Amino acid sequence: MASVLETLCGQAYGARQYHMMGIYLQRSWLILLFFAALLSPIYAFSQQLLAALGQPPELARDAGLASTCLLPTLFVYAIILPTVTFLQCQLKNRVTAVAATVVFLVHVAATWLLVRRLGLAVLGATMAYNLSWVVYAALQVAYAVGGGCPETWTGFSASAFALADLKEFVKLSASSGVMVCLENWYYRTLIFLTGYMKDAEVAVDALSICMSLSSLEMMVQLGFLAGTGVRVANELGAGNGQGARFAMFVSTMTSSLISLFFSLLTLIFHNKLALIFTSSEAVIHAVDDISVLLAFTILLNGVQPVLSAVAVGSGWQELVAYVNITCYYLIGLPFGCLLGWGFHYGIFGIWVGMIGGTTIQTLILAWITLRCDWNEEALKASKRLRQWSNIM
């Protein structure tokens, strides 16, 4: 839901309406903290929920322990995600980078101490994770409200908390949240479904390794996602539609070439990928069997996140949410289940189906983006900013 700030703050910064950005940030904090409270029972009772859904008792217990321990981070997310976007929209990426460097060192030290030294296993890992996010949030919030953003943060404002004006902001935040969640949940569903397969433990281990490798590579694309969304929003807010188009094109090409490189590395070292994580021969062979799918997923990661960033920067969240529902959950997921269970291809079939959904979604987003009239989008951005300026 915080991604709505990429649209509003990004376009406001491009239009030099700096005073509105602090109000957007405060309003996002309020809404996200409220929704974090609503979501907290899912974390607290995840073991019971997973068990009721038929997951194996051991998996449900371990996941339940991790989820319960991660509950504090849910509320930290509600603070840090809008703050990061607030800073990125002002091109203060160096602040985020410095904070991330400091927190990385804290995280490595805390993880070593709690997991390896004290032997707390999953509990220690989640404790280190919580600590890292708290430190990360504290550093960036201190910068944002402590004088680092004098033009965009002028203190807390009562207008940001006016109940009469929250309705439209909640609507925009919900559209952004639905769009992003449908994307993030899609491949998480793959891991969830794997828990129902034969030899679930090996399958989940192999898939988790592949998802971890994909996520590591995805960090590069998330950088492009953040940068592209902000740049497109800045250009549209400034009334420069062609500048937004050029930013989209450069980001997509650069991100695609980087993903192609990592995809080739995955194919070259297909039988050695799992050695980073495990010495189990069964898991190593299982990862090798699906390494081609991992390579193709990495290749898609070069295009899909950038196009999603363009959608966020342009304010197309509601449209993309419908595209995601159709491609992911009406096409990809059923097709994956059909291949996995109906045709007995197992984890390979589930993943093929879900990649199919992602491919269709990427093609649709590419078609929408190529057909877009960027000058018209710039006019829409100006109209939106005038509307929100009157509300605030």
Image (tube, rainbow, N blue to C red):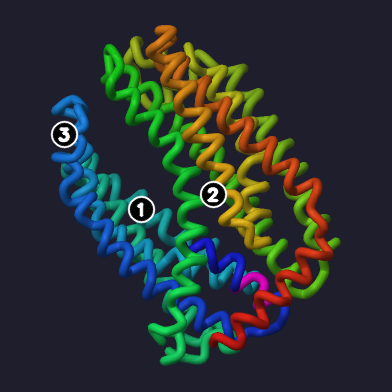
- Which is nearer the eye, 258 or 376? 376
Select label 1 or label 3 by which is in front: 3
Contact flag, marks 1 and 2 (Cβ < 8 Å): no
Image: magenta residue range = 9-13
The dot on residue 157 is none
For marks 1 and 3, the one nearer the N-term is 3
Point 60% across, 88% down: residue: 390
Q: Is residue 249 left or right of residue 189?
A: right
Q: Which mark is residue 107?
A: 1
Q: How far apart are the alpha carbons under marks 3 and 2?
A: 29 Å
Q: Which secondary structure is most common in the magenta stretch? A: helix
| Residue 265 in the image: above or below residue 220 | above
Which secondary structure lies at badge 3? helix
| Amino acid at pointer 1 | His
Q: Does 72 lie within the magenta span?
A: no
The reply to whether callout 1 and callout 3 are in contact (CB within 8 Å) is no
Residue ID for mark 3: 52
Q: CA distance from mark 1 to mark 2?
A: 34 Å
> Which is nearer the eye, 125 or 21?
21
Question: Could you say which quadrant of the image residue 86 lies in?
Answer: bottom right
Q: Disc 2 residue type? A: Ala
**Of the image marks 3 and 2, the number of the one nearer the N terminus:** 3
In the image, residue 355 lies at what x, y percent? 55, 27
Q: Viewed as shown, does residue 278 lie left or right of 291? A: left
